[in-house]
Image (cartoon, helix red, strand yellow):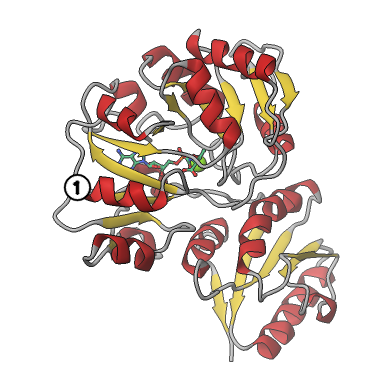
């Protein structure tokens, strides 16, 4: 593809620079791509109703074109521009969680096939970030935005991650600092008889089910470690978020995990390999490895989510040959964290006791 000059503009979310945002909005309206912060991860935005903009998004990311994009809106009524009908469940969930880290799948109306990857449904989300909302409003468009990473790499949680992957391929990057949540939005499908979570995230099935007053199921395809069941969200089938080195998760009681990982590290080092361990503040000092990466305190699951993708990227920068990670089955968002970690490790888990 033709390389272009990517403008990187710093925007303070608390005091948004109107001139920069007007330029960014104009670029989107003209069919160009602008990366922007959301509360979950950075997104790569383009006009959702403009097939050519959608094609540019797929090209910039190197993304398979059967993997549909999420349409980002700034006002609830905008959902009517893309949905055939707005289910009652969508109104309830929007009332409770929008703007916020929740994407809803509904039957689509006039969204180009280029945006929805050929599907009859559309994913819609109202992000909870002042820069994202301002960009949508200033552009006058609905904004299609996948995570702003090269396809297959960890999602970007800082503007520098976007620049690493997409510099020269997009018109502008809005740098609003590090994101708050660090993992992508929860996706809920509202097109079947029972609401179903297609991607776990910060908003848990329990929170959704409390608002809906009915059971919310989880797509069996995202829990299975093998290929027997296909996940319903096309993007969930890809090996994703993966660092370049081989990664293994070691699960079990903390003392057993420390001994097991130290033994595995020792073996690799004997063979001249450079090894990283993904641990916590509490356990970090117990490991002997070339690099010890801390996800923060095991008691702070929000911090674990925030650090995850940056740490996976660091493994690439440090050119390690092997990575051993502790498991993070934390109480509330552990399911979302482990979903990403398991994919990064290609579902390779050693259980010890
Ligand atoms: O937090 C987020 O959702 C971020 C920020 C930028 O908003 N965006 C994001 O987009 O994660 P992306 O493209 O990286 O992931 C979108 C996921 C993919 O797994 C895709 O297959 C699924 O949503 N998806 C999109 N439209 C769908 C549809 N109509 N039916 C089923 N899955 C869909
Ligand atoms: Mg993504």
Identify the image quadrant of residue 106.
top left
> Is 324 placed above or below 212 here?
below
> Is 51 placed above or below 185 here?
above
> Is 26 placed above or below 86 here?
above
Helix, strand or loop status at disc 1: helix
Where's residue 144, x and y in %? 43, 27
Residue pictured at 56% horizontal, 12% vertical: 27
Where's residue 271, x and y in %? 81, 67
Q: Answer yes or no: is residue 220 visible.
A: no
Residue pictured at 29% horizontal, 65% vertical: 209
* Residue density around tag 1, few if under 14, some if 14–19, many if 20 or more, within 10 Å: few
Front position in the image: 132 or 311 = 132
Q: Which residue is mark 1?
A: 88
Where's residue 304, x and y in %? 65, 64
Identify the image quadrant of residue 324.
bottom right
Residue pictured at 54% horizontal, 63% vertical: 337
């Amino acid at each position: 593809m033709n390389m272009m000059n990517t403008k990187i503009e710093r925007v303070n979310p608390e005091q948004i620079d109107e001139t920069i945002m007007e330029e960014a909005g104009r670029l989107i309206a003209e069919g160009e791509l602008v990366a922007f912060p959301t509360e979950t991860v950075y997104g790569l935005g383009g006009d959702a109703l403009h097939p050519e903009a959608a094609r540019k998004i797929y090209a910039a990311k190197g993304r398979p074109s059967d993997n549909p994009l999420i349409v980002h809106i700034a006002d609830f009524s905008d959902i009517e521009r893309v949905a055939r009908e707005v289910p009652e469940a969508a109104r309830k969930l929007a009332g409770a969680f929008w703007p916020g880290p929740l994407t809803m799948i509904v039957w689509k109306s006039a969204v180009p096939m280029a945006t929805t990857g050929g599907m009859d449904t559309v994913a819609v989300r109202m992000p909870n970030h002042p820069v994202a909302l301002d960009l949508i409003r200033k552009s006058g468009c609905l904004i299609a935005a996948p995570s702003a990473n090269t396809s297959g790499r960890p999602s970007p949680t800082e503007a520098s991650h976007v620049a690493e992957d997409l510099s020269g391929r997009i018109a502008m990057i809005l740098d609003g600092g590090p994101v708050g949540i660090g993992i992508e939005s929860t996706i809920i499908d509202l097109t079947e008889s029972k609401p179903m979570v297609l991607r776990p995230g910060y908003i848990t099935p329990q929170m959704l089910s409390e608002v809906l007053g009915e059971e919310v199921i989880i797509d069996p395809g995202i829990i299975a470690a093998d290929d027997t069941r296909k996940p319903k969200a096309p993007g969930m089938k890809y090996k994703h978020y993966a660092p370049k080195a081989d990664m293994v998760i070691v699960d079990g009681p903390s003392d057993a995990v420390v001994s097991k990982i130290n033994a595995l590290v020792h073996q690799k080092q004997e063979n001249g390999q450079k090894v990283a361990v993904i641990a916590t503040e509490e356990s970090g000092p117990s490991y002997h490895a070339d690099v010890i990466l801390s996800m923060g305190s095991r008691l702070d699951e929000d911090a674990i989510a925030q650090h995850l993708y940056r740490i996976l990227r660091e493994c690439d920068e440090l050119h390690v040959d092997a990575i051993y990670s502790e498991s993070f089955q934390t109480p509330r968002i552990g399911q979302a964290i482990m979903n990403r970690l398991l994919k990064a490790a290609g579902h390779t888990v050693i259980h010890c006791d």
